[in-house]
Amino acid sequence: MPPRKPPCGNPVFLKWMEELRDAAREKNMKSAEGYGKACRSLQNCPVTYTRPRELVVLQHIGEKTVAILEKKWKTYCEENNIVMESPAKKKNKGKSRDTSSLDDNEEEEESDLDEIPKKKKARKTTTKAYIPANRSGSYGILMSLVLAIDNPEINTQVFLTKSELIRGAQDYCDSSYDHSEKGTYFTAWSGMKTLVNKGYVYVTGNPHKYCLTEEGYEVAIAMRNLRPEFSHIEKHPFLHTPAVGGSNSPVIPIQRTPSIPTPIDRVSSNQSIREPSPVKSATRPKSQRFQFWYIDSSGNRVTSLSSASIRLDPVEFTNLRKVEFRFSQRTHPFASQLRLVEETSLARVRDNSGESTLFGFIVEEEAPPTCSKFDDPPISASAPAQSKSKRKTTINTDDYEDISIEEDEEENETLISISQIPTRKPKSVHPIEELISADRTFSRTVSAPAKPSSPISNLAAEAALRRQIGGTNSNRSHSLTELEQPKRTTSHRPAPRLSSHIPNPTVHVHLDQPLPSTSSSTPTTCTTTATNFQPSDAIIYPSGSYEIILIVDTREVESRSNRDKIAESLADKGIKVETRALRLGDMCWVARRIVGDLGGEEDECVLDYVVERKRLDDLCSSIRDGRYNEQCFRLSNSCINNIYYIVEDWQVTERMEYHGLQIMTAKSQIQIHNRFFLKETHKLFETIDFLTTMTKVIKNSLRGKSLNIIPTKYLSRSTYKSLQTQLKQSQPNKEYLISFNAYQELNDKSASQTLKEKFARMLLCIKGMSPERVSSILDLWETPKSLYDSLKDRNENQPLEIELVDPVTGKKRKRSKELFFADMVKGEGRRKIGDALSREIWKAFMGSENTNST
């Protein structure tokens, strides 16, 4: 006879487990199989357990199953008046104690302790600074950033591009920043994400530029001092003022030779050179950094960029932030980048320092995250008061400490006073001597018409004098502020579309010199672009040192099953082709160096040609979902002159039957409105033949020519188009290209989007809204919050209907709240918002329950 099975030692627990198994089987749950295995384990176990939690020693019974059985056990004990045993106590390590030796008092004390929850002691958290491992990717990046600081006593924030940063970091890292190791997708550049998350590196601009934060500067200095070759370098405090003019360009020179007196012999009758007295001489400020505050919407001073008042630039449609700066620093290089600066006559003393200040606006993309604040200097009692008949302005330059210009309004005299002698010995006659001896009167030449009888303003003399005595910095094209620009006459022309671009106004300021010709090798005009690029800074590819390669987007395929057909067909025709993920366009051509490789962006540039390929079915779908308008706008805004739009036939009869009008409208718009070159092909092979012919034409056109490339550190999405416009005006015979990496970052769809752009896209989703109407709304409300606050105030704090007087007829009419936009937006033509569209916009923001019929 077979051996008898031992009886189950836990029949109650087995019954509960079978109930769980049966319930899971009824619901077709996967856990039914696990419960079945647990039932078999309980059935074969002869050992009796007092509580379900002791069943964890059995196979196929886990913590979740025990938790379910514990709840059933608790209910079972309450129904049968069974006293539940207290859980066994965990003893301290290293001590053994028999639980059976505890007396009744000790058991009662333990049960009481179980009921009282023990409070956990708060751990003392000490944040440790993140130190990158030696020779790692993060280590090399920090070393490259800290070693790029040439003048730490003047500036410790130097912005570097990715290629500049990699070039300096590779010597201090064992792995590559460009290529990943075998079997992984990570490079040494992945350490940049860690540094940004730790707050050691600050990223700004598009294309991205990187600099050290205060925390990163301290860690990088500590790492640098550990290396014996850099241990002798002195540590300087961190300065918050960023460098002006790109990477590795100090604000002012460090070393100065002892001051040598320069005689000035001839002085005209209406000018006087005054020797400074020891009491009245103006002292140069100790700090050369630009001091400013951010100003919020209430007019208060704030330190954060995000809290500053925001407005739209009327020319470039970029976001501006309001700032307040010293009147004495209006000639600082940083002040030249400000927009919409107040006139000098509006300067006022707004604090206890006794110094006048001005308001202006800074481009949000290029602004630091926090302001530098004011260093309140003591008020000098001997400083002369500013009279009504004379206006005095002070110019700070590198060659002279303070040069002030006083303009007598009554006698029309200009008095120039030099408070200190030059601090550098000039090699030849100083420009200020030529200015005074050769020509005794200042004059200016501007592009806008001016009255000949009007007296010279101190601002024109200041701008002209700064360009004459600028020294080594005079060859930089600093941007002019609104102070130096002539006042624009108001035009009745409606505001432009969102997809258009108005070039920045150009102002010529010279001293008795004719306007420069457009064929000049060095541009002498100053525009409002925030770049200091000069043609001499361009990277040059000599003729014969590069090869032309066709780049095809990885998403351009013949079909899903044959993804490499286009690239293979082009290669069979003798064309050098590569497949990459393009962020704009489907095909483009790049020039790659074959001799003298420098590494990084200097080895590859994008030529002035791009192709967008659409099959007829793809064109129809892109028109319906809005991709067509977006791609055309981005292509127009890419500063590529030769844009080709290829449309391939595909199921022509069917497509023209349902979407014939849309297709013909799109083809006409491509040629007339967007000014693209339209090429229609019947099949893919014709497209390949066209690309082959285009490649040969490009090669022939560039044979024997050198290429000029703008370094990435001079590029910014907000100023790139105006920079290209300026270069075409000053040097029409030259083309300035950009690197492939810069092309990718500048034309990224989402990298440079601002809140205003996202708000505009939101408004375009409303039926009936056009770019002109969106532009008219953005003139009044720049953010969704400001618009919603106005709508909420109209909805809650004003009556349902208000009476308005028609300015044309003079009649009174009642207007409901849904007509808010029709009443507030004063647009003409295509910018006008009617009553029906106003109701749609109100419904989109306030909902249908808040609308009332009129």
Image: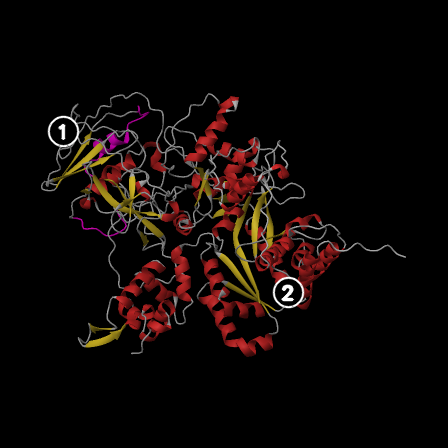
Q: Label 1 amino acid?
A: Ser
Tell me the residue at 19%/72% (across/down): 807
Helix, strand or loop: magenta stretch: loop
Q: Secondary structure at mark 2?
A: helix
Foreground pick, 261 / 792: 792
Identify the colour scheme used: secondary structure
Foreground pick, 795 / 753: 795
**Left or right placement of residue 613 versus residue 467 in this view:** right
Mark pair 2, 1: CA separation = 83 Å
Foreground pick, 295 / 708: 295
Crowd around label 2: few <14 · some 14–19 · many ≥20 (10 Å): some
Dividing the picture into quadrants, the one containing residue 650 is bottom right
Q: Secondary structure at mark 1?
A: loop
Mark number, residue 684: 2
In front: label 2 or label 1: 1
**Left or right placement of residue 301 versus residue 92 in this view:** left
**Image quarter (top left, top right, bottom left or bottom right) of the C terminus:** bottom left
Q: Label 2 amino acid?
A: Leu
What residue did someone put label 1 on?
A: 382
Q: Image height check: is 610 above or below 411?
A: below
Q: Earlier in the sequence, mark 2 or mark 1?
A: 1
Stretch in magenta: 424-452
x, y percent for residue 367: 36, 44
Dividing the picture into quadrants, the one containing residue 461 is top left
**Residue 511: in sight, yes or no?**
no
